[in-house]
Amino acid sequence: MVITAIILVGLAGVLAGGAIAVFTWSAVTSKVFLMAAIVAAVIGAVFNAAADQQGAAAATIWGWGFVFCTCACCVIAGVYLKGRLARWMHRFVIYSGFAATFSAMAAAGFWMGSRGTPGYWVVGIFIGIYVVGSACIFAVKTLTIRRVARIMPDYISSLSGNPLEQGGQGYW
């Protein structure tokens, strides 16, 4: 059961990352990927809860928290994708990337919780995944925005305009 949970939560991360890969071709497909990521994360968490573990380890509890973070980031990414507002493409990429990162952290938490990994290892692994995930998000955001700037000419002009006229709040 725990292995199934780890695989499903990992799949949620792959789907969130896949949403970034396909959004310039189809916003609808990206939304489907994000919804599927939420479903996979929740089902993975249910499988982890169904596993007969004697007392939840702290890593497992953190894994549950990261599943909720994955779901929240997928929802927020979907909101920024709504209407494909050019100004918010970078935020869609950031939130989808964090959904994938939190999904990896949840899978690691479930795996470490099932093995009784010591706390200092748990903290170190979580920090490592977060740092690597953040670096990957930065790289993917940079590459994706360069691509969006070429194929969506209104992206650059949207950054200099008034955001309230484009259906959103200010940059910060």
Image (cartoon, rainbow, N blue to C red):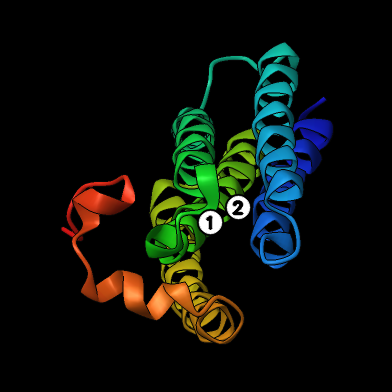
> At 34% from the left edge and 77% from the top edge, which residue is drawn?
157
Q: Amino acid at mark 1?
A: Thr
Q: Quadrant of residue 17?
A: bottom right
48 relative position to 75: left or right: right
Judge the density around disc 1: few (<14), some (14-19), many (≥20) Cα neighbours within 10 Å: many
Secondary structure beneath dot 1 equals: helix
> At 73% from the left edge and 58% from the top edge, which residue is drawn?
18
> At 44% from the left edge and 31% from the top edge, which residue is drawn?
65
Q: Quadrant of residue 49?
A: top right
Can you see residue 38? yes
Q: Position of residue 64 (x, y in %)?
A: 51, 28
Foreground pick, 83 / 12: 83
Q: Position of residue 141 (x, y in %)?
A: 48, 75
Q: Position of residue 155 (x, y in %)?
A: 43, 73
Q: Which quarter of the rendered picture does the C terminus lie within? A: bottom left
Question: Quick check: 110 above or below 84?
Answer: above
Foreground pick, 77 / 8: 77
103 relative position to 26: left or right: left
Disc 1: which residue:
101
Q: Position of residue 125 (x, y in %)?
A: 49, 60
Secondary structure beneath dot 2 equals: helix
Q: Are marks 2 and 1 in contact (CB under 8 Å)?
A: yes
Disc 2: which residue:
104
Foreground pick, 44 / 77: 77
As measured in the structure, the alpha-carbon distance from the residue carrying label 2 to the one carrying label 1 is: 5 Å
> Where residue 171 is drawn, which disc sits there?
none
Question: Quick check: 76 above or below 64?
Answer: below
